Image: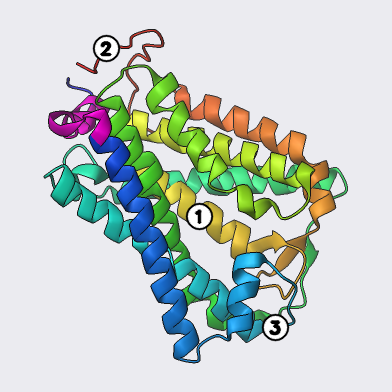
Amino acid sequence: MSHPFHRWVEAARPRAGVWRTLAGTALVIVAWVVLANVVAAVAVVSGLIEIGDLRAMVDEAPRELSHRDAAIVLGVGLATFVGLWVGVWGVLRVLHRRSFASLISFDGRFKSGQFLIGAGLAAAYLAVGMAMSSLSGGAPQRSGLPLETWLVALVPLVLLIAMQSVGEELLFRGYLVQQLAARVNTPLVWGLLPALAFGLAHVTNGREDPQFTAYYIFAAVMLGLVMTATVWRTGGISAAMGFHVFNNIGAMLVVGLGGGTPVSLFTLSYGDVVASAPTDLLVLGLLLAFVLSPYAPLPKGQALRMKDTRAAP
């Protein structure tokens, strides 16, 4: 019970019934969908975006936008994730009768040092991936976005990316991992299932290319496992938050996918991403092994009981 992970899981044990976890997850998703529609409606009614921009954001239909409008559409899309914050907070308070802080870490405190370590791991992953992609001939290309225009939108978009990324961590690495680990010891349940759910939640990001969709889902699952490993090591989601926030900043604002009006400084074509997919997945596998190893700059992990299906002690 002395390990931070077990202390973190202990907070969920009093009300870890399967029905509560299923109901809680459903309620979080409902809150997310409802508030996402509210945010989108407010943005349209206020004139911040046009209804056509909203359809492009949901259906990914081609639409010519200025750099400013593209940044606003992205910002509105990121703001729709506020429902995850509200949903998780409400479920914890009403259904599980515990504090929001009990989800953050074993002692209820946000760990800024661990957040920075997670961000550093994401930075290393992105740097290695870009270096290997460049060596294989798929180097990112400079977008047509002027640097000064990019800088104007940088701060608000970074803040919105942080809100969106942390919101996903509250659900996938926080609520789901904590609730499942309170019932079952094996990481094949509390580690793998939330990562699979995280991957499947990104199925719509794959556009219409089946190869890219398969890669995107697999990569999201691997990223989910990496972030879950940091939770296992630290007994909280601060490091996972840092990893997710920095990874999404890099993927959205520094090197984004080509097509449409760019909001990133550099772009990669879908063909280059698919071509470098095996290399990227290999890098993610090595990163997962590193986070699980004693060499990662994180607290020492406890034994992973693969076959123990009893409720966590």
Q: Earlier in the sequence, mark 3 or mark 2?
A: 3
Residue identifier under label 3: 65
Mark 1 and mark 3 lie on one chain; the one further toward the N terminus is: 3
- On the image, numbered disc 1 is attached to which residue? 246
Q: Residue at the far top: name it.
A: 307
Q: Quadrant of residue 175?
A: top left
Query: Which image quarter is the N terminus in?
Result: top left
Estimate the x, y position of residue 5 in percent, counting from the top left. Answer: 27, 28
Q: Which residue is mark 2?
A: 310
Marks 3 and 2 sit apart, C-alpha to C-alpha, by 54 Å
Q: Main secondary structure of the magenta part?
A: helix
State which region is magenta.
4-19
* Mark closer to the observer (2, 1): 2
Residue 15, compared with residue 122, is above or below; it is above
Q: Residues within 10 Å of mark 3 (few under 14, many from 20)?
A: some
Q: Residue at left 83%, top 50%?
A: 272
Element on which disc 1 rests = helix
